[in-house]
Image (cartoon, grey):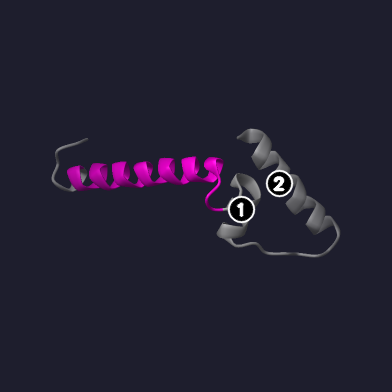
């Protein structure tokens, strides 16, 4: 995971050094790092993120009801 972040960071730094400030959408970054939608790697990441979101929603709801510290 760290290697991917380093690669992305070096690409951004290279763009800045060329004095061409390019912006990327979050979807563009996900495509670059994890591949296109429908690939096994991307599907796995999307499923993990969905599970994380659900877990955070449950935890926040429990906090609101003072069931979890």
The residue drawn where x is 63% and y is 46% is 33
Q: Look at the numbered disc 2 and give the secondary structure of its residue.
A: helix
Tell me residue 31's x, y (percent): 61, 53
User: Residue 50 appears at what percent x and percent y?
Assistant: 38, 46
Residue at the spot 30% in from the left edge and 41% down from the top edge: 55
Q: Residues within 10 Å of mark 2 (few under 14, many from 20)?
A: few
Residue found at x 66% / y 39%: 4
Residue drawn at (76%, 46%) of the image: 10
Q: Is residue 67 left or right of residue 10?
A: left
Write down the region rendered in magenta: 37-62
Between the residue at mark 2 and the residue at mark 1, the CA separation in whole angstroms equals 15 Å
Most extreme residue toward the right is: 18
Which residue was labeled with disc 2? 9
Q: Main secondary structure of the magenta part?
A: helix
Question: Residue 15 got which mark?
Answer: none
Magenta segment: does it hold 58?
A: yes
Q: Which residue is mark 1?
A: 31
In the drawing, does residue 41 fall left or right of residue 55? right
Residue 47 on image: x %, y %: 42, 43
- Residue 60 lies left or right of residue 15; in this view the side is left
Closer to the chain start, of discs 2 and 1, is: 2
Q: Position of residue 51 (x, y in %)?
A: 35, 42
């Amino acid at each position: 995971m760290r290697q991917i972040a380093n690669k992305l960071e070096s690409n951004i730094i290279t763009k800045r050094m060329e004095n061409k400030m390019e912006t990327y959408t979050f979807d563009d970054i996900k495509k670059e790092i994890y591949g296109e939608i429908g690939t096994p790697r991307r599907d796995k990441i999307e499923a993990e993120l969905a599970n994380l979101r659900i877990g955070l929603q449950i935890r926040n709801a429990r906090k609101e009801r003072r069931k979890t510290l």
